[in-house]
Amino acid sequence: MDYVELMEQARPRLGENCKGCLICNGRACGNKMPGPGAKGIGDTAIRNYEKWKEIRINMDTLVERKPVDMSLDFFGKRLKYPIIAGPVGLVAVHYSDAYTDTTYNDVLVSGCAAEGIVAMTGDGADATVMQAACGAIKKVGGLGIPTVKPWGPETLQEKFACVKDSGAFACAMDVDGAGLPFLKKLNTSAGSKSEAELAEIIRNAGVPFIVKGIMTVKGALKAKAAGAAAIVVSNHGGRVLDQCPATAEVLPEIVDAVQGEMKVLVDGGIRSGVDIFKALAIGADAVIIARPYVTAVYGAGAEGIRVLTQKLAAELEDTMEMCGAHTLAEITRDMVRL
């Protein structure tokens, strides 16, 4: 199976809101929520995609020919590629009932582990979602990253108990999830967190903590001060706030501000190995890709994950070769034109 065949197989299974576009650029789904679209007028997801395309690559093949190594150390785990599958929740609502959150995370976590990468799992108001996600991570020896919503203290205590039992090597919180429509409707203490509240959450987590949903230097420095081991430059794919800048627009200044003192990940509109190279050149340690992995799972389960991951890896390897980078450490900002 190749990528085109994967997409053809996925389309009839994705539901009426996702069109299964060969290029997932946010245009066909627009502002469809429920569905895979973005909030408000729906332009943030589109902008995420387009801003990566405005960055150009500086080719240089006057270098010694050597094998390309795309692996990286990530909190004690050796990943084959700098790719993390992003967390997605309520898949039966946003896509179709071909999967539930439980069955989706089971396939995603094990499929990514088989490809030498890791998956982040989603969370939900139903406690069984986190329990099942952590169970899937436990089955692969902790090779996954549970992602917790910004709940109140009592709920977080229950969630972190699941994280601990899973043996996960890291966990995350999508702090920008405070803007998700479903979370805003719940009568809970979920919502935005102060720096002091975040510091307490990180202390209670017990594993390296990743703060997802950072879009400003100010936010990055607050996460750093609170003790985060990593941040994700993310606007939640445009699903939490209308008319945000693209992640590619803010990544350079955030990378420069943290000065290598914490890991920086980025998501939002990254759709190819060339896009991955651009993010790494700017200074990201790895990238997170979400919507395309949903399509991959719906299209062919674990085989879909393999097809998508190998496509991305082949494109990244080719770009590195053509720019004279043989390891991730050799990818530098002067290899791209911002």
Image (tube, grey):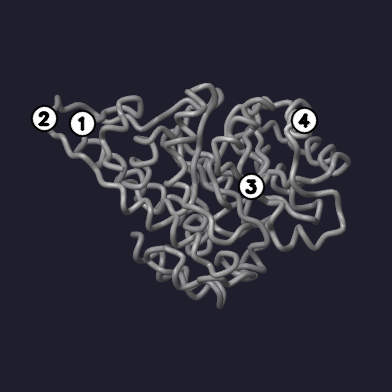
Looking at the picture, tell me which residue is in the foreground, 233 or 317: 233
Mark toward the viewer: 3 or 4: 4
Q: Is residue 144 above or below residue 42?
A: above
> Type of residue at label 3?
Thr
**Mark 1 or 4, closer to the camera:** 4
Q: Quadrant of residue 324?
A: top left
Give me the residue at 45% from left, 56% from top.
304
Q: Residues within 10 Å of mark 3 (few under 14, many from 20)?
A: many
Instruction: Specify the quadrant that holds the N terminus.
Output: bottom left
Q: Dot 1 lies on which element?
A: loop
What label does residue 164 carry, if any? Answer: none
Q: Which residue is at a point 34% across and 65% down the rendered structure image?
A: 4
Mark 3 to mark 2: distance in Å?
Answer: 42 Å
* Left or right of 76 on screen, residue 315: left
SS assignment at label 3: strand
User: To which residue does mark 4 refer?
Assistant: 196
Q: Nearer the viewer, mark 1 or mark 3?
A: 1
Q: Does dot 2 land on a helix, a strand or a loop? A: loop
CA gap, disc 2 and disc 1: 7 Å
- Residue at image position (58%, 45%) is 109
Among the two numbered marks 3 and 2 on one chain, the one whose residue lies closer to the N terminus: 2
Find residue 62 and name its label.
2
Q: Amino acid at mark 1?
A: Gly
Q: Which mark is residue 324?
A: 1
Q: Do the numbered discs 2 and 1 sit on residues whose CB atoms are within 8 Å?
A: yes
Q: Is residue 89 above or below residue 121?
A: below
Q: Residue type at mark 2?
A: Leu
